[in-house]
C-alpha cells in the first residue's frame, strides 16, 4: 500500500463518514494523514537496529583524498538518508576493492579521537587500511591515502522515512503495512476518545509488532556464565 491507500484503510476501519481523497485533504482526513505519517516514523524509531532500516553505502575514492563528506557520498541533492553507521564488527565494517586485482580487503574502523591521535603524523599511501567518521558531520576519513580509485563499501542505518505524498510507499515489505494501519487506528481512537477502536487495534498492533521483531530485529547471543 502507498500512503494514500494506508490512510484510506484507516479511514474505512475507523468508520469515519465521507471519502478520503488525498493526504492533503483538510479536516479529519488531514488528522488521519498526520497520524499515519507519525506512526510510521514511530515504528522506525522503535528500534535502532531494525533490519529493514539497514542499507549499503558504496563510493569510489579519489587519488590523494582522505576526506569524504556526505555531499560526496550522496552526490544527488536530497538523497542522503544516512542515520548512523552500522558497526557490529569493527574489523569488517568496511571493505575496499582494488581496481587492478579486484581483491577485497577489510578496512578497520577506529574511533574518531583514537584515529586523530594515532594517525596525526601518518603519511602512508595505498589501499585504505583504517577509517573513521566525524561524530557531528559524518564525514569519512581514511588512512592510508588512496593511490588508486578504490571502491569502498560499508553499511548504515537510514534516517526514518517521512510519508508526504499520496504515492509514497513505506520502505518495508508490504506484508507489514497493516502494522502502520493498526497503530494509526489505535492512536486515532485514543485521540478521539473512541475506546473501542483504541483498545481493539492496540492489541492488533502489539501482536503484529511482536511478529515484526521476530523477523526484523537482529538475533542476540546471550552467554550464561556459571558461578563456581
Image (spheres, rainbow, N blue to C red):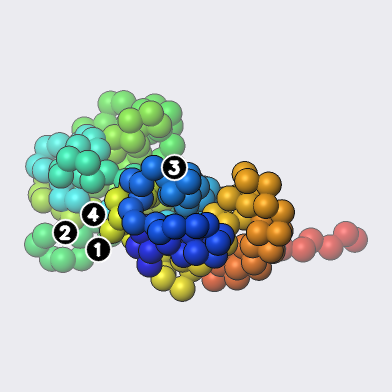
Sequence-first tag of 3 and 4: 3
Instruction: Single out the mark in the foreground, 4 or 2.
Output: 4
Residue position for label 4 = 58
Which badge, 1 or 2, is on the more N-terminal residue?
Answer: 2
From the image, tell me which residue sits under label 1. Answer: 104
Q: CA distance from mark 2 to mark 3?
A: 58 Å
> Is the N terminus in the top left, top right, bottom left or bottom right quadrant?
bottom left
Task: Give the foreground label among 2 and 3.
Answer: 3
* Residue for badge 2: 98
Q: Circles 1 and 3: CB distance less than 8 Å?
A: no
Where residue 62 appears, as percent x and y from the top left, is: 11, 43
Residue 27's tag is 3
What SS does tag 3 mark? loop
Query: Looking at the image, is 67 positioned above or below residue 10?
Result: above
Q: Quadrant of the C terminus?
A: bottom right
Marks 3 and 4, Cα distance to the nearest angstrom?
44 Å
Q: Residue at x 35, y 50 (%)?
A: 23
Amino acid at each position: 500500500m502507498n500512503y494514500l491507500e494506508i490512510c484510506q484503510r484507516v479511514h474505512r476501519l475507523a468508520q469515519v463518514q465521507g471519502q478520503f481523497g488525498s493526504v492533503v485533504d483538510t479536516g479529519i482526513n488531514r488528522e488521519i494523514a498526520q497520524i499515519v505519517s507519525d506512526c510510521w516514523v514511530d515504528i522506525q524509531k522503535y528500534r535502532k537496529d531494525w533490519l529493514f532500516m539497514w542499507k549499503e553505502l558504496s563510493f569510489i575514492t579519489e587519488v590523494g583524498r582522505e576526506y569524504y563528506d556526505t555531499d560526496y557520498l550522496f552526490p544527488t541533492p536530497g538523497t542522503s538518508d544516512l542515520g548512523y553507521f552500522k558497526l557490529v564488527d569493527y574489523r569488517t565494517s568496511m571493505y575496499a576493492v582494488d581496481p587492478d586485482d579486484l581483491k577485497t580487503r577489510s578496512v578497520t574502523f577506529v574511533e574518531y579521537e583514537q584515529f586523530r591521535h594515532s594517525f596525526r603524523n601518518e603519511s602512508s599511501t595505498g589501499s585504505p587500511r583504517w577509517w573513521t567518521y566525524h561524530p557531528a558531520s559524518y564525514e569519512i576519513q581514511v588512512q592510508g591515502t588512496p593511490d588508486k580509485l578504490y571502491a569502498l563499501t560499508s553499511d548504515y542505518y537510514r534516517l526514518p522515512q517521512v510519508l508526504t505524498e499520496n504515492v509514497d510507499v513505506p520502505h518495508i515489505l508490504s506484508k507489514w503495512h497493516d502494522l502502520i494501519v493498526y497503530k494509526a487506528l489505535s492512536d486515532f481512537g485514543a485521540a478521539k476518545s473512541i475506546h473501542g477502536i483504541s483498545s481493539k487495534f492496540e492489541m492488533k498492533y502489539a501482536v503484529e509488532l511482536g511478529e515484526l521483531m521476530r523477523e526484523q530485529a537482529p538475533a542476540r547471543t546471550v552467554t550464561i556464565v556459571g558461578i563456581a
